Structure formats: C-alpha cells, structure tokens
C-alpha cells in the first residue's frame, strides 16, 4: 500500500512538472529567461518575415550582424525608415538582463517585423568577438550598430545603463523603457502601444 501510494505520488509530481514546463513555453508563460516559447531558428524568422516592405526587408537582410558607422549610419537608417514605427534596443553581451530579455526580442521582432523596424545598439562591448559570439547563440531578425564607446547608445536612449529600449511612433514621438523586459508579452504590448498605436 505504501509503495503504491509513493509511486502514485511520484507520478503526480512528474505530470505536474511536465505541465509546468509546457505552460512556461506557451505565449505569456514564464520561461527561464522571461521570454515566450522556444528560440526561433533563422529559417523560421525568415519565413515569418517574408513579404516585408523593402525598408524593413533591408533590415532583415542584415539580420544578426554588427554594423559600423555610428551615429551618422544610424541617422541614415532612421531616415530610410520614415513612416514606419521603430524599436531600438540597447544591449551588451556582458549584460545579464540584456541576455535574459533577448529571446523576447527575437520572438517579438519576428512577429511584428513586417510592420515595425527593429534595430539594436551593441553599446559598451570592448570588442566585436563577444557580441558576435552572443548573436550566434541568440539570432535576431535585425542588425545592431556596434557602439564600442557607449556614446551612441547614451545619445539615443538618454541613459548610460543597459538594457534600454526606445519606441518611436510613426509621428516621431518616443517612449523610453529603462531596464529588462520581463516577458515577450510585455514587449509585444509596448510595441503595440508605443510604436504601432502612437
């Protein structure tokens, strides 16, 4: 009787664990990095973004790369995106909160990338090797501008901290979120509110 009860208890615990893991992988779930679901592959992101308008497709063509050029290159890119909402995420490969929110950016940028421009600023990394290795593990559908000194990131986000996200509506109004996004659901909500609906 005791053995049967112990086996039944273990079975219930195992089923509960499987359910908990499954729920954490659902949209709005609480995965280990505060994101939703498993990481997307580059092929899946490409499929989700097929048919994007040319200015956004140009971003996707540079997916997961570190771009040079600093402030002037970013200004030129933003000029080419006039009329589109923009989300700029300042991050660094050594920043744990940045790493924790990155899979949320991967998922939401793929979901909204046919309507919203996503751009990264890799701010304060002392070399290109570390962020390049990080991007190999956490691919995203958009490029980042390499900002060794941190000056560009501070100029764009009005903050020396990381992570920071700037939402720019079609009308040019900005909203700045300081700190890590707790989930992809929260990020998607803010993309809708401060970029698409602004």
Image: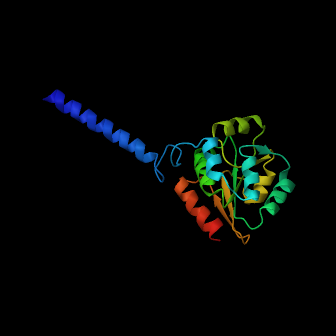
Residue 70: image location, x then y, percent? 84, 51
Residue 56 in sight from this viewpoint: yes
Residue 4: image location, x then y, percent? 17, 30
Residue 171: image location, x then y, percent? 72, 72
Is 171 above or below relative to 187? below
Indicate the colouring scheme. Answer: rainbow
Residue at horizontal 84 percent and vertical 58 percent from the top = 76
Residue 65 is drawn in which quadrant?
top right
Residue at horizontal 65 percent and vertical 42 percent from the top = 139
Residue at horizontal 32 percent and vertical 41 percent from the top = 16
Q: Is residue 102 left or right of residue 124?
A: left
Picture quarter with the C terminus:
bottom right
Of 86 and 101, nearer the camera is: 86
Is 22 above or below relative to 191? above
Residue 38: image location, x then y, percent? 52, 43
Residue at horizontal 27 percent and vertical 38 percent from the top = 12
Of 75 and 64, nearer the camera is: 64
How many numbered circles are shown?
Answer: 0
Residue 112 is drawn in which quadrant?
bottom right
Picture quarter with the N terminus:
top left
Residue 143 in sight from this viewpoint: no
Q: Residue furthest top?
A: 3
Q: Is residue 129 left or right of residue 24?
A: right
Is 176 above or below relative to 109? below
Q: Residue furthest front?
A: 51
């Amino acid at each position: 009787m005791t053995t049967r009860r112990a086996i039944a208890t273990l079975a219930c615990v195992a089923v509960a664990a499987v359910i908990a893991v499954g729920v954490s992988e659902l949209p709005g779930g609480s995965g280990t990095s505060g994101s939703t679901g498993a990481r997307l592959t580059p092929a899946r992101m490409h499929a989700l973004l097929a048919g994007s308008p040319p200015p956004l497709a140009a971003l996707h063509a540079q997916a997961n790369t570190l771009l040079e050029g600093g402030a002037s290159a970013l200004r030129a890119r933003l000029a080419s995106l006039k009329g589109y909402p923009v989300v700029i995420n300042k991050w660094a490969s050594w920043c744990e909160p940045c790493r924790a929110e990155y899979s949320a950016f991967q998922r939401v940028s793929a979901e909204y990338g046919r309507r919203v421009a996503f751009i990264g600023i890799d701010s304060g990394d002392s070399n290109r090797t570390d962020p390049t290795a990080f991007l190999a593990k956490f691919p995203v559908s958009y490029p980042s501008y390499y900002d060794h000194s941190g000056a560009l990131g501070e100029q764009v986000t009005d903050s020396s901290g990381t992570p920071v996200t700037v939402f720019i509506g079609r009308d040019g109004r900005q909203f700045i979120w300081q700190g890590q996004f707790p989930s992809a659901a929260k990020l998607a909500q803010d993309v809708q509110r401060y970029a698409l609906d602004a």
